[in-house]
Image (cartoon, rainbow, N blue to C red):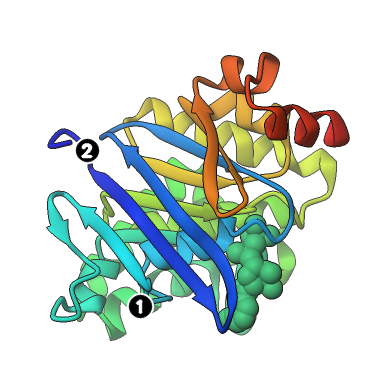
Amino acid sequence: MTDSLLSVRHVRKAFGDHVVLRDVSLEVRPGECVVLIGASGSGKSTLLRCVNLLETVDDGVIELAGEDITDPRVNADSVRSRMGMVFQSYNLFPHLSVVDNITLAQRKVHRRPAAEATEAAHAMLSRVGLADKAKARPDDLSGGQQQRVAIARAMVSSPSLLLLDEVTSALDPTLVGEVLDLLVQLREEGMTMILNTHEMGFAKAVADEVDFLCDGEIAESGPAAAVLDDPQDERTQRFLSRIL
Ligand code: ADP
Ligand code: MG
């Protein structure tokens, strides 16, 4: 489909003889938020890691804006610079201030001039509601604030796609709301996102589309309300009845 920002077609990924992704296809259109759900170990993180070229696929194609990024000749760094990835555990550097955490890769990897990188970091911190925390250390912030810094860091290079892997799983339940609010805001601003979560309330609040990963394939896919409230596939029904 030509209107997709990301097109995953018939992707297969195994670790040794353990086939994790057997035949996965999905399309993400610009501005859309796709939420991946599925049991622990179903391959949600592996799929995001394949999209971000942290893993190589065994078969199938992944296209970003029409370009086949699974072609071994592509420059992986340049592809990755067009995506932002955020992990469950924030991965902030504890010895660096918030603003330095955001500018580090900009300066060292992308060779952005320091003044420009700092200006962009402050602008992103305002966007995530943490303008007053630029000089703080990660340890001085709550988990929710640290995750918002990690999201700011992923967004500062103006990626066309944001990949979020269980970004609220490590958070105290009272801190999930602020991260959810931020993702809803980014979606309203038109950011294209794929996120994994095991929190169905979270999925419903932010998803344009929910994809249920099971047995190495997308077993069911559709609008959040359809998949979560009225699942058609028996595997989706079983999964949801276990966790709700
Ligand atoms: P999820 O994110 O849905 O919980 P993962 O994608 O993390 O699932 O893992 C899917 C399966 O792939 C698991 O069985 C996991 O042990 C396995 N796996 C993931 N990464 C590797 C790896 N680098 N080497 C071997 N097995 C892996
Ligand atoms: Mg995972």
Task: Give the answer, above or below, for where 193 lies relative to 57.
Answer: above
**Image quadrant of residue 181?**
top right
* Residue under numbered circle 1: 105
The answer to whether one can see residue 227 in this image is: yes
> Which circle's residue, 2 or 1, is located before the other in the chain?
2
Figure check: 134 above or below 168: below
Whether disc 1's CB lies below 8 Å from ligand 2 is answered no
Q: Amino acid at mark 1?
A: Ala
Q: Which mark is residue 160?
A: none
Which image quadrant is residue 114 in? bottom left
Badge 2: few (under 14), some or many (20 or more) residues near its Cα, within 10 Å? some
Mark 2 vs mark 1, foreground winner is 2
Give whichever of 2, 193 is nearer the camera: 2
Q: Is residue 134 visible?
A: no
Q: Is residue 57 left or right of residue 142?
A: left
For image coordinates 62% across by 36% down, the residue present is: 180
- The residue at 43%/76% (across/down) is 55
Residue for point 84% across, 28% down: 241
Q: Which mark is residue 4?
A: 2
Task: Locate residue 143, reporting x and y percent.
Answer: 73, 57
